[in-house]
């Protein structure tokens, strides 16, 4: 049984990490399992993130979020993190039939380094292809949130990292990147209104995931 890769994307402060953990908890709770026919009970759920989903990735994350660097350097480090992540964590989990819930993946690189930093989109596409070996998410949950609202949330948390500290114009370009990607890939990128209370966002995400099980029945059999 092949597993599933579900990715959470969005601007800073949109609630990706919180909602990823909420979905993982809901999928593994007896009362919260999806009721779509063919959904196997007890599918292992793996939660991970980029950057930082491996031991090497943890070291790269500290560099990426804490140290000033040239934009091309940033791009290449994200690609290195992803290559290790796919090889060490994601592909083995999918091959074992696990569901992988990932906080950021290929679309973040397009949005942040492509639209945000202004780097060449064709180069980013090539690097993503190399890093992933062509692996794409089965479903991408794009948590839509006003950029200013998201940054306000991060300021309330305090101790903002290097990316969160970038100016508003940068984050607005990132948002444009996500909007463009959603228009280009409606078959896998589903927008979720993240301005609602967390419980309502969790419920909306669960509904979307359940609906997207419909095309997957044969591959979901144990």
Image: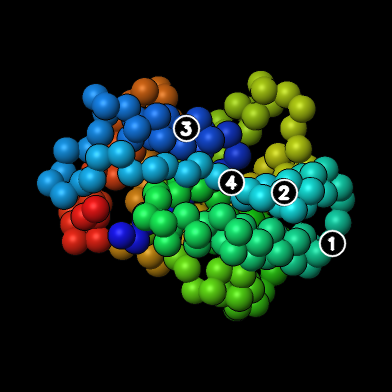
In the picture, the disc for residue 21 is: 3
Relative to 150, residue 172 above or below: below
Task: Bin the neighbour count of mark 3 within 10 Å (Cα to Cα): few under 14, some 14-19, many 20 and up.
Answer: some
Quadrant housing residue 125: bottom right
> Disc 1, disc 4: CB below 8 Å?
no
- In front: mark 2 or mark 1? 2
- Mark with earlier residue (3, 1): 3
Query: Nearest the camera: 188 or 4?
Result: 4
- In front: mark 3 or mark 2? 2
In the picture, the disc for residue 70 is: 1
| Left or right placement of residue 175 versus residue 203 in this view | right
* Residue underneath mark 2: 55
- Mark with earlier residue (1, 4): 4
**Residue 122 percent coordinates (x, y):** 60, 78
* Residue underneath mark 4: 49
Residue at x 66% of width, y 21% of height: 156
Q: Secondary structure at mark 4?
A: strand
Q: Secondary structure at mark 2?
A: helix
**Residue 54 percent coordinates (x, y):** 66, 50
- Quote the CA–CA distance across marks 3 and 1: 33 Å
Task: Bin the neighbour count of mark 1 within 10 Å (Cα to Cα): few under 14, some 14-19, many 20 and up.
Answer: few
- Quote the CA–CA distance across marks 3 and 2: 21 Å
- In front: mark 2 or mark 4? 2
Residue at x 61% of width, y 70% of height: 131
**Residue 128 percent coordinates (x, y):** 59, 70
- Mark with earlier residue (2, 4): 4
């Amino acid at each position: 049984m092949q597993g599933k890769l579900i990715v959470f994307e969005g601007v800073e402060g949109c609630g990706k990490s919180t909602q990823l953990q909420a979905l993982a908890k809901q999928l593994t709770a007896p009362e919260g399992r999806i009721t779509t026919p063919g959904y196997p009970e007890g599918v292992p759920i793996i939660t991970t993130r980029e950057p930082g989903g491996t031991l090497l990735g943890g070291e790269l994350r500290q560099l990426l979020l804490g140290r000033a660097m040239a934009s091309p350097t940033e791009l290449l480090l994200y690609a290195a993190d992803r290559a290790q992540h796919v090889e060490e964590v994601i592909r083995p989990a999918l091959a074992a039939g696990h569901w992988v819930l990932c906080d950021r993946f290929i679309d973040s690189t397009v949005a942040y380094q492509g639209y945000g930093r202004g780097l060449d989109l064709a180069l980013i596409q090539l690097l993503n292809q190399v890093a992933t070996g062509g692996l794409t998410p089965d479903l991408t949950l794009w948590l839509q949130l006003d950029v200013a609202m998201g940054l306000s949330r991060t300021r309330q948390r305090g101790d903002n990292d290097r990316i969160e500290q970038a100016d508003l114009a940068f984050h607005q370009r990132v948002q444009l990147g996500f909007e463009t990607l959603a228009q280009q890939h409606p078959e896998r990128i589903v927008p979720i209104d993240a301005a609602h209370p967390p419980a309502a966002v969790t419920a909306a995400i669960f509904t979307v995931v359940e609906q997207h099980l419909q095309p997957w029945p044969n591959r979901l059999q144990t």
